Image: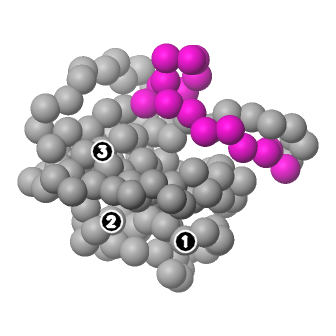
């Protein structure tokens, strides 16, 4: 898979989750390339959203941009409590994707041995049962 190199910090909160997702991406032959988006700055892709906790407009930087033969995926990987608190960003991402042909995306979480699941619904709800979430490997 061709991709831009990026630096992984030695230690940070989401490192294990992101490393696991990279392994998933590298094992998928349908992916032409992937890009790890930055966390801040005008040079990276962001979506404006209303943060209901802080009650202000903020920018959301989805973690991954992934290209397959027919689609571009915009995905933000989460785990546990970060998935629970992703409602505002998940809904903003779905609103941004709504009328864009060839684009799909959402919040993705690893479901143990069941692989990565993604919520592509306009309404976002996270529970450990992942009801209504799709198998990411099946839609890539």
Quadrant of the frame with the N terminus = top left
Residue underneath mark 1? 121
| Residue at the image point whose x is 25% and y is 71% from the top | 138
Residue 46 falls left or right of residue 56: left
- One can see residue 110 in this view: no
Q: Earlier in the sequence, mark 3 or mark 1?
A: 3
Q: Secondary structure at mark 1?
A: loop
**Residues in magenta, as a range:** 37-52
Circle nearer the viewer, 2 or 1: 1
Describe the element under mark 2 as helix, strand or loop: helix
Residue at image location 15% in from the left, 44% down from the top: 32
Q: Nearer the viewer, residue 23 or 98?
A: 98
Q: Confirm whether the magenta stretch covers residue 45.
A: yes
Q: Dot 3: few (<14), some (14–19), or many (≥20) neighbours within 10 Å?
A: many
Residue 54 on the magenta span:
no
Name of the residue lying farthest toward the right:
55
Residue 76 as seen in the image, left or right of residue 47: left
Which residue is identified by label 3? 66
Q: Position of residue 103 (x, y in %)?
A: 38, 54
Q: Quadrant of residue 100?
A: bottom left
- For marks 3 and 1, give the CA distance: 19 Å
Q: Is residue 6 visible?
A: yes
Q: What residue is at 9 percent from the left and 54 percent from the top?
A: 29
- Crowd tier of the residue under label 1, counting other residues whose Cα lies within 10 Å: few below 14, some 14–19, many 20 or above: some
Tally of marks: 3
């Amino acid at each position: 898979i061709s991709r831009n190199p990026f630096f992984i910090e030695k230690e940070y909160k989401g490192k294990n989750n992101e490393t696991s997702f990279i392994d998933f991406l590298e094992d998928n032959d349908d992916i032409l390339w992937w890009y790890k988006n930055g966390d801040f700055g005008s040079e990276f892709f962001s979506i404006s959203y209303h943060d209901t906790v802080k009650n202000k407009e903020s920018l959301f930087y989805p973690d991954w941009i992934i290209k397959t033969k027919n689609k571009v995926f915009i995905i933000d990987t989460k785990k546990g409590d970060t998935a629970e608190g992703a409602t505002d960003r998940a809904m903003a991402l779905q609103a941004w994707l709504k009328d864009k042909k060839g684009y799909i995306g959402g919040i993705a979480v690893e479901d143990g041995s069941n692989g990565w699941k993604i919520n592509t619904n306009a309404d976002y709800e996270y529970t450990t049962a992942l009801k209504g979430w799709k198998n990411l490997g099946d839609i890539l």
